[in-house]
Image (spheres, rainbow, N blue to C red):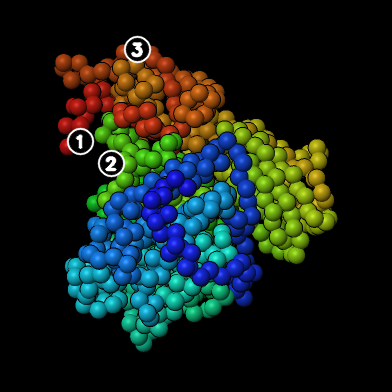
Amino acid sequence: MKTTKNLLFSLIVVSLLITLSGCKDQPVSDGDYTIQPVPFTSVKVTDDFWAPRIKRNHEVTILIAFEQSEKTGRIRNFMIAGGLEEGKFQSRYPFDDSDVFKIIEGASYSLQTFPDPDLETYLDTLIYYIGLAQEDDGYIYTFRTIMGDDSHPWIGTKRWEKTHIFSHELYNIGHMYEAAVAHYYATGKHSFLDIALKSANLVARDIGWGKIENYPGHQEIEIGLVKLYRVTGNRKYLDLAKFFLDVRGDGQEYCQAHKKVTEQTVAVGHAVRAAYMYTGMADVATLTSDPDYVNAIDKIWQDIVYKKLYLTGGIGATGGNEGFGEPYYLPNMLAYCETCASIANVFWNYRMFLLHGNAKYYDILERTLYNSLLSGVSLTGDRFFYPNPLESFGQHQRQEWFGCACCPSNLCRFIPSVPGYVYAKTRDRLYVNLYMDNTARIEMDGKTVEVTQQTRYPWNGKVELTITPDKPSKFKLFLRVPGWAQNEAIPGDLYHFLNNDENEIVLKINGKVEKCSPDKGYLVFSRKWKKGDIVELDMPMPVRKVKAHRNIEADKDKVAIQKGPIVYCAEWVDHKNNRVLNLVYDPETILESEYRSELLNGVQVITGEAMETKRTIEGEVIMENRLPLTLIPYHVWANRGSGEMMVWLPTTKEVSWPLPAPAIASKIK
């Protein structure tokens, strides 16, 4: 690894002093998900879409994230807290510890795909610093250790006093727990896991019923504790996660503490906090079979998907609270859609799938994954979006870094974890949930099954899988059929396709066509599988026109374009006078698609025609010339400079923006 080599080599002697345990068999908890995740360590992605992004994350994004963490003092905070250096807290926010933890998590995932001795040694050094910063009883929070009690408005006069406000003590260590588990899975080393367990044991000692009864103002520790439970089998971590949820109910909507979690039925407040909490609730619902949790989380999911979800999968419409607005309030240019919220939305819908085994949760996960989430990082891997609007007159551009760097560090950890979302399993079921070239080795009921996927997804819906069990094995294969392939834009009625696709989905086993009816969104085929069995799934992928629910004011008299899981947009650079906000889409235009390998690292482009509009001196909006219309995948917008962009295309001149960008800017202000 190129980053920070001066620091690395100057501290190599320190890293050699670290005592690391060797690889051990992974502990398995007694109680677990009914549907089991297939971990990222079992899946090697080799396609032209995700593999380059995962590699770029390894070579660019993680590198610059660590460099920024050194430049801003985030890493030095651990050195000061651990007594290696002197000084005050170096970075901006008390929650800055969490960024280092998230980057370590991403680097750990990345090591599984790209073995890198320099990176691994660097992580060992960072973990050593973190261990030094941890106080003797397990407490770790560098701001308090360095600056003392009552040293910031968010910091109380004693530990855990303001966890329910802004202290982020529990938020930080929740990310540490997730990072420690990822590092353990990737390397087999216990160094970081031991630090995390020491911390969690302290939290369990100090906080709980009859002790300190506070909840985290920013949810996250619940997810980390569940991961510690799954890796150790120690029930107290799961019980503590449930406590942090159950103790809520005397606080604000902003952090979802206004009611008991089992009494909440609608999504409110800060979207990232909410989706992290809903992820924790889904974990607890699955692992404890608590019907009240299941009932609550199902209703919240329906509230979002039926009333508060952007077509791109983004959540959180309003910037003031970085969160949810009223039902159907989904503005486009003012859309917040924080990148972290998209990542949290993927986490949550993944857990909902593990809870219910229904493909509709993966429909939301996939929509978010390929659109609002990927929009958050540039194709070069070194520029980032915090909000992800669906319309722009050019005021939006990705940034190198942010003072609050939650989004870049979250992308660092998410991108290399994508292989862990492809498959899932039970004793006698193998779920194929995402489609991308990969080779996986999956343990099922004491047998090893190798699965190889070949596909050009998301540009094409043809998928070929080769099933190779180590010996003939009988199990059910569950192939997800996305909603878009079944004429369903989204579960519920928030969005719908204008044009139904009458083409049939074709499934072949060893060249023979098989008839299967979808079950919870899956084609299910049971047989005794033998080495070299070939499964072919052909899902036609035409261009689709999308309409929004009549109550979404921002999308009235507009249409959006989607192909497969990809939502498209019009961008300035492809159009006359660098304008798109003055275009009116002709619903009768014939839309065609083609793959352009030379454009934006290779994308499927959709072309058609539109009319341009302008405003007369009298203020009347008139239609002028018919122009070529070019649409690119939304997730690659703003990679060629800043300018106008829109996802929802007006179908009448009354809803177009026939003004130049400066005039539009003045209207919005």
Does 321 appear above or below 483?
Answer: below
- Residue 623 occupies quadrant: top left
Q: Distance between the residues labelled 3 and 2?
A: 29 Å
Q: Give the image location of residue 107, x and y in percent.
A: 48, 53
**Identity, as a three-letter code, of the amino acid under mark 3:** Asn
Residue lying at 36% horizontally and 23% vertically, measured from the top left: 573
Does 473 appear above or below 148?
Answer: above
Residue lying at 34% horizontally and 42% vertically, measured from the top left: 385
Does 332 appear above or below 3?
Answer: above
Q: Distance between the residues labelled 1 and 2?
A: 9 Å
Label 3 sits on residue: 625
- Residue 78 occupies quadrant: bottom left
Left or right, 659 with reference to 28: left
Label 1 sits on residue: 668
Residues at circles 3 and 1 in contact by the CB criterion of under 8 Å: no
**Identity, as a three-letter code, of the amino acid under mark 1:** Ile
Label 2 sits on residue: 334
Does 215 appear above or below 183?
Answer: below
Left or right, 256 with reference to 420: left
**Identity, as a three-letter code, of the amino acid under mark 2:** Leu
Q: Give the image location of residue 339, x and y in percent.
A: 38, 48
Mark 2 Cα-neighbour bin, 10 Å: few <14, some 14–19, many ≥20: some
Q: Give the image location of residue 394, x and y in percent.
A: 28, 31
Q: Give the image location of residue 155, x and y in percent.
A: 23, 71
Q: Is residue 261 visible?
A: no
Residues at circles 1 and 2 in contact by the CB criterion of under 8 Å: yes
Q: Is residue 578 visible?
A: yes
Name the N-terminal-most of marks 3 and 2.
2
